[in-house]
Amino acid sequence: MLPGHTQLLAILNIGVLWYRKGSAVEKIALGGGFAEVTHDRVVVMADTAERADEIDVERAQRARDRAEARLKELSLDDETYAKAYGELQRALVRMAAGGGNSTPG
């Protein structure tokens, strides 16, 4: 968002939030929440948030592997499928944010 952007309130999904601090790009793994954009600032109210330097990528990879294995055992009709899918998404986001890549995306 650029200064002077139209005000808005947005629902955030699980994903990577990145921002610039000087010339550096910082990443945060978000577990969903809300963003409020005013003319001069953005406020993020997240369910969970982890800075890239707080993320144990190997642990996230193990969580991804466990979630993928669970999903293979479940059908779309299974009530635990959504939970396992959410666990997979959180692990992938943590890996993306904590992977040390300094460029957005």
Image (cartoon, grey):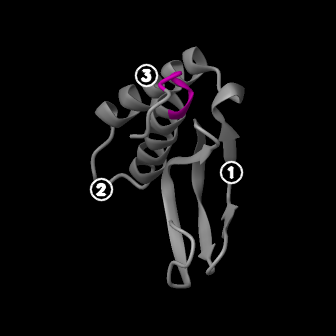
Which is more foreground, mark 2 or mark 1? 1
Amino acid type at image mark 2:
Asp
Depicted 11 relative to depicted 82: above or below: below
Q: Earlier in the sequence, mark 2 or mark 3?
A: 3
Which is more foreground, mark 2 or mark 3? 3
- The residue at the point 68 percent across, 47 percent down is 49
Binning the other alpha carbons within 10 Å of mark 1 as few (below 14), some (14 to 19) or many (20 upward) gives few
Q: Secondary structure at mark 3?
A: helix
Horizontal side, residue 66 vs residue 41: left or right: left
Q: Earlier in the sequence, mark 2 or mark 1?
A: 1
- Point out residue 22 in the picture as x, y percentages from the top left corner: 64, 42
Q: Nearer the viewer, residue 97 or 5?
A: 5
Q: Which residue is mark 3?
A: 65
Per the rendering, the mark at residue 77 is 2
Q: Which residue is mark 1?
A: 48
Binning the other alpha carbons within 10 Å of mark 3 as few (below 14), some (14 to 19) or many (20 upward) gives some
Q: Nearer the viewer, residue 22 or 53?
A: 22
Depicted 42 relative to depicted 50: above or below: below
Q: Which residues are magenta?
A: 97-101
Binning the other alpha carbons within 10 Å of mark 2 as few (below 14), some (14 to 19) or many (20 upward) gives few
Amino acid type at image mark 1:
Thr
